Image (cartoon, grey):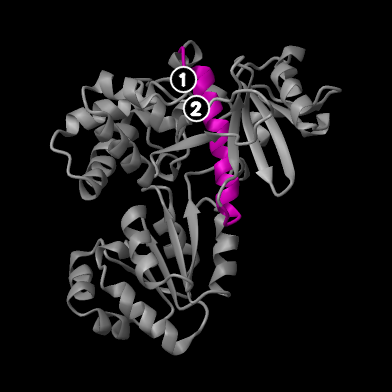
Amino acid sequence: MIERTIEEKLRQMTTKFPVVTLTGTRQCGKSTLLKQRFNEFKYISLEDLDRRQFAIDDPRGFLMNFGTPLIIDEAQYAPDLFSYIQTRVDEKNEAGMYILSGSHNFLLMERISQSLAGRTAVLKMAPLSVSELRKASLLPENLNDWLITGGYPRIYDKEIAPVDFFPNYVQTYLERDVRLLRNISDMSQFVRFLKLCAGRVAQLLNIASLASECGISVPTANAWLSTLETSYTIFLLKPYYRNFNKRLIKSPKLYFCDTGLAASLLGLEEPRQMETHYLRGELFENMVINEFVKRAYVQGREPNLYFWRDSNNEEVDLLSEQGMTLECYEIKSAATMHSDHFSSLKTFAKQAQLDTNRLHVVYGGEQDIQTSNGNYISWKNL
């Protein structure tokens, strides 16, 4: 098993809270982590229909039978169970009683907000990061390989080619989960919508245009985007909210939670196709921003990430805000360095009154280098 960075935070939270909730996209490694690294807990999955029915029909008996500490995977399938967990937690008032896990974030969090608010820590898990793969000596040497492969653990554990993994992932997981979350009669139209989203990766979201091209209404497009966000398929990066006396762009930008999935939806099957693809730069940008999202998740916090663009099309690809600290990143897929890479960063830094040590360019090269303009960071060192 590939070592997962979030394990440390997860263990820490089991010493502080009676319940810890672990959620995230399907196939990102939640079940594997819990089964193989938390042996002190008994593991039960409600994907097992018999155990699911037991939990639904007799939640009190289910909890008494399996005791604590207990991991309940896909817990959202037994909604009444959460009230009984609340009762047991309030009776014992002990840390580390339950770990709940699930991929249906909306359903899971709905149950938690109703019954376990204030009693559980909530952690999010993402596919493998650059640092996790690097530590395991599995990070692809070639950038195009990494962009097209993505970070789903099964690809690496079972040595599955991306061209075989992702179409099946879309069919067996996304389509099933989407049907649970929303009543969609024409799944082929939804998959077309998904592919159109992939074609807009790292671009400003124009919902009206997206809806028109897919042949659906704007409210339907909004609902489907919400479903994709809920299932951790896409996320929206918001524009930076501070006004520096210029009209700012207010639309968010659309990204996928894994570049391998986005590349597959774009019809890319081999790394050589990535080299000349018109969205290679956008997919690289998506990958870099994903790494910042993953970094926040393993620390148990929500990512405070933004982009900045003004009416003159001056843009900073990524702003990372932590308290009073603001780090600025330009993202370039090219492997070569050029002083022009810092142009927009300098414009923003002047308005935000930032030092050059807050300015960074993440690029497709191999070396980390400090310059008088700012810092170059290799994609391999994210």
Rendered location of residue 309, percent (x, y): 60, 23
**Residue visible at 38% across and 39% down?**
233
| Residue 103 appears in the picture as rendered | no
Q: What secondary structure is the magenta-colored segment mainly? A: helix
Seen in the picture, residue 351 relative to 312 is either above or below; the reply is below
Rendered location of residue 142, percent (x, y): 57, 24
Does the stretch in magenta take in 297?
A: yes
Asked whether the residues under the numbered discs 1 and 2 touch, taking CB atoms below 8 Å apart as contact, a structural biologist would say: yes
Q: Residues within 10 Å of mark 1 (few under 14, many from 20)?
A: some
Q: Quickly name the residue at label 1.
A: 271
Seen in the picture, residue 367 relative to 129 is either above or below; the reply is above
**Residue visible at 23% across and 32% down?**
190
| Residue at the limit of the structure toward the left, as seen here | 185
Instruction: For the C terminus, give its image quadrant.
Output: top right
Q: Earlier in the sequence, mark 1 or mark 2?
A: 2
Q: Quickly name the residue at label 2.
A: 147
Q: Residues within 10 Å of mark 2 (few under 14, many from 20)?
A: many
- Residue 318, picture quadrant: top right
Residue toward you, 136 or 267: 267
**Residue visible at 18% across and 29% down?**
188
Residue type marked 2? Leu
